[in-house]
Amino acid sequence: MFEKYGYFETAEEINKKATELLAAGDKTGVMELAKENGIEEEIADIFCSGSGEIDYICDDETAAIGKIDIEVVELQPQEIFKDWVEYIKASILKDKNIAIAVRKKDKSLKECISKILLWSFKNSYDVDKDIIKAAQKENKNIPDNIRLGIPGMGTVKKMIREYFLTDK
């Protein structure tokens, strides 16, 4: 991630670099910068076109979602983890402060999900025996004792907010 142009903490930094590249006539560089930061190719194309339609390639929200999208490629989240990623994206679109915080070097999707997972283990509970027995009718390999600790949507959204808006 971020090998060619390095890591940018703000949309402003990304836009400044894109403007520098475009001023130097390096449209390929602008496209590479956009790809490296998860910014849609179509937006970079319009920026490079010189039409004047847009004079930047990202705002705080698209820069943050771009970072999350780049991290998703590396992590390959599945099932509930995908839901958590979508909650993060919704939080970015809902709160500009979260969008800004997501781009910080000390914040990452991996760490945010690890905090939620840690909460899951700390707050696990015994699954009701009747539920386990019903499941065992379908699959005899299910153990007699199961603990579960998946947080609800409200808890996860609160944890996402706290993670991104709290300094380490």
Image (tube, helix red, strand yellow):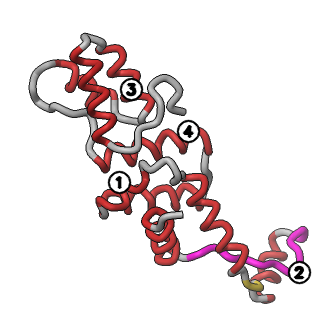
Whether the magenta-drawn stretch holds residue 45 is answered as: no
Tag nearer the camera, 2 or 3:
3
What residue is disc 3 on?
A: 33
Q: Looking at numbered disc 4 in the image, what kind of residue is underneath it? A: Val
How much space separates mark 4 and mark 3, taking CA atoms? 17 Å
The residue positioned 51% from the left and 71% from the top of the image is 159
Question: Do the numbered discs 1 and 2 sit on residues whose CB atoms are within 8 Å?
Answer: no
- The earlier-in-sequence mark between 4 and 3 is 3
Disc 1 is placed on an element classified as helix
Q: Looking at numbered disc 2 in the image, what kind of residue is underneath it? A: Asp
What residue is disc 2 on?
A: 144
Tag of residue 73 = 4
What residue is disc 1 on?
A: 100
- Observer-nearest residue: 142 or 75? 75
Tag nearer the camera, 4 or 1:
1
**Which quarter of the rendering shows the C terminus?**
bottom right
What residue range appears in magenta?
A: 140-151
- The earlier-in-sequence mark between 1 and 3 is 3
The residue positioned 75% from the left and 88% from the top of the image is 128
Instruction: Check the image and report above or below for 114 versus 57.
Output: below
Disc 3 is placed on an element classified as helix
Q: Looking at numbered disc 3 in the image, what kind of residue is underneath it? A: Leu
